[in-house]
Image (tube, rainbow, N blue to C red):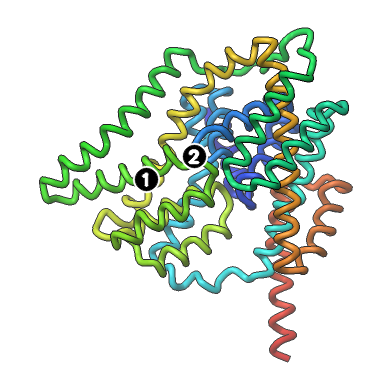
Amino acid sequence: MLSTFFIFLKLGLTSFGGPVAHIGYFRQEFVEKRQWLSDASYAELVALCQFLPGPASSQVGIALGYFRQGLAGSLLAWAGFTLPSALALMAAALSLQQFSAVIPSSVLVALKAVALVVVAQALIAMARTLCQGRPKTAIALAAAALSWWQPDLMGQLLAMGLAGVLGYSFLKPPTEPKPLGPLRVPSRQLGVMAFAGLVLCLFGLPLLERALSLTGTHNGFWATEINLFFRTGSLVFGGGHVVLPLLQSAVVGPGYVSNEVFLSGYGLAQAVPGPLFSFAALLGASMNPSPTGWAGGMICLGAVFAPSFFLVMGALPFWEKLRRYPAAQTALAGINAGVVGLLGAVLVKQTHAALSTNLGVLPWLALLAVLLFKFKWPAWLLVLGAIVGGLIQAQVQSQGLLS
């Protein structure tokens, strides 16, 4: 049972680079190495989670955990992937001012390069499997072009929708459905209960907050924290970076967290592995009035991720039924190709942004690409090598400046 936790714990300790990189890390671990599911099934799962509000990479992890060991597996997968960054950020919240200059910029540059080469590897492998033939290649290019022209969430949703329509219109259905493999899928009853639980919390938590606030005790603020972060996790599309400005207005505006702490914490969140939604743990540990510290951090962390469990458990059983229809299979084949196009557009944009801000990324990209593609280094070893190399580079640069 604990094997799922330790598999995701390794990823939680080494998965730098944001949700797109996490998707690459997951694919390397669960499609290539462990063969828990096929490339096509993995792409379908990624596409499904892209349509759901909340952190897509964490939702993919929750689903993978459920496939293997049911509800317990989904909880263990989430805990293993999320707790390393959450605990680090909560610890940082207790002495945030001391962390502003701890991590050398050369380390951050090297870790950014790791994320880019891992995404590139995933993109190449998925393109070979999911974009065979000119029609699928054309769909991938169309999705990439649309997401490039409209880079916000609406553009991504339109690109996925366009890919599905083109797949339905121009692709031939497979002779028989591709099985997901020996994977558990939530029952339809569990799916209905999950959606009902989400709706109940969305409407019930504000009522609970109002009722407890009338008591004049700290219990009212506990309810405020839970309601604030649960609602954010439920209704925000677009992943971690989209949730940050909304959280800023929610916690800085009322004075729960100072703007200095918020901005410093956001910068630190870029340097830790795992999901960016773990930033909620730092905010919870820093909020005023109480509860603060570890209790507040865990409350906000659980509240912001809880909707993801409801959404994944609610969507998976209907996704599994839908994918068995021939029309749905052709649409999903188009969406699979569209996922490749989206990843390609993101990779190009991230690479351009990285090079435009710091050309020092380029030698790291070349070195890490050789280590990954030629010498087959695993992702965790690339991360470790990048950290060590970045520290050595920082030391050399400091000595050069001092001499």
State the residue in front, 31 or 236: 236
* Residue that lies at the very extreme toward the top in this rendered image: 175
Q: In x, y percent, where is residue 119? A: 73, 45
Q: In x, y percent, where is residue 247? A: 41, 53
Q: Are marks 1 and 2 in contact (CB under 8 Å)?
A: no
Q: Which mark is on residue 229?
A: 1
Q: In x, y percent, where is residue 309? A: 45, 31
Question: Mark 1: which amino acid?
Answer: Phe
Q: Residue at x 59, y 14 (%)?
A: 322
Q: Residue at x 76, y 51 (%)?
A: 348
Packing grade of label 1 (10 A; few <14, some 14-19, many >=20) is many
* Residue that lies at the very extreme toward the left in this rendered image: 215
Q: Which residue is mark 2?
A: 54
The quadrant holding residue 41 is: top right
Q: In x, y percent, where is residue 234? A: 42, 37
Left or right of 285? Residue 327 is right
